[in-house]
Amino acid sequence: MKYRPTILNVLSGGLLIWMIIQFIIFTINSTGAGGEAWSVVAIIVLVFLSIIGLGIDFLIQLGTKKLKTKNQHITRNGIGLILLIGLYYFNQNHRRDLNIIIPNDYNNAIGIVYDFPESNKLPVNILTLHSNVELPKSGLIFTSSRMKDNDIPHTKFINENGDLRYLGVNGIWERRYSDEIQIDYKGGLVTVRIINVGDEETGREKIAECETIIRNKLKKYATQQGVKMH
């Protein structure tokens, strides 16, 4: 069998070479600073993935060796492209973020009501799978989408000027800035995430006030539809 270049083996081989170079540079410049262990792990994982890619490509070429040369080229690159696209979307599905665009001077809490049946699902960018939402004047977002189990690192607040609004020290969103609540609504439960993106000093008060507003709104919506809230 004549081993030929394909999209999969070129990208996998290029990634492998690049990671080896990065590992050499990393070793030379290593200073013992914190976080280096994670860098080594990332390099090892990418090297492992690139080797797997080369192995899969070899199996594809082995399985298509009886095809005509033109058909081999189309089949091998087609399968490789499908695998790469699938891997990309698998990774993006895990990393998908909720990006909330807020006014530059916004200094209050934000409430996100998930599992709300009367609202639409969060919009999804077909290329990145991220959701970009402009914050309503009420500071509340109602959606029928479910909240991710690890929603905190995947929820970003971006000012209208494009700057990322950090919550907490060193850009880390700490749990003291938010609450997660489940509220009964029409016999089911909605999950509510309330986040203070303003001054820390009055954060708890803002979160409590936002919770009260949400509970009142849910009670009003349910009452209008003839459902008694518990």
Image (tube, helix red, strand yellow):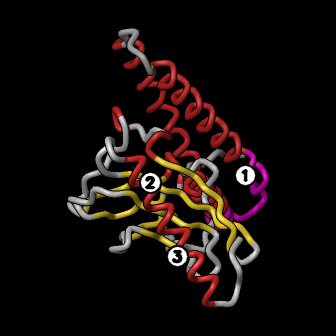
Tell me the quarter of the image containing the C terminus.
bottom right
Residue 188 in the image: state x and y as whole percent: 74, 71
Relative vertical location of residue 182 with respect to residue 144 in this rendering, above or below: above
Image quadrant assignment for residue 92: bottom right
Secondary element type, mark 2: helix
Q: Earlier in the sequence, mark 1 or mark 3?
A: 1
Count the marks.
3
- Label annotation for residue 60: 1
Q: Nearer the viewer, residue 148 or 74?
A: 148
Say if mark 1 contacts mark 3, CB within 8 Å: no
Q: Earlier in the sequence, mark 2 or mark 3?
A: 2
Residue drawn at x 39%, y 62% is 100
Which range is magenta?
59-76
Where is mark 3, residue-wise?
A: 217
Farthest residue to the bottom: give it.
225
Residue 49 x/y as whole percent? 62, 38
Q: Is residue 69 magenta?
A: yes
Magenta stretch: dominant SS? helix
Q: Residue at x 33, y 57 (%)?
A: 108
Farthest-out residue, top: 32
Per the image, the residue denoted by label 2 is 207
Residue 36 vs 162, above or below: the answer is: above
**Badge 1: how crowded within 10 Å, few (<14), some, or many (20+)?**
some
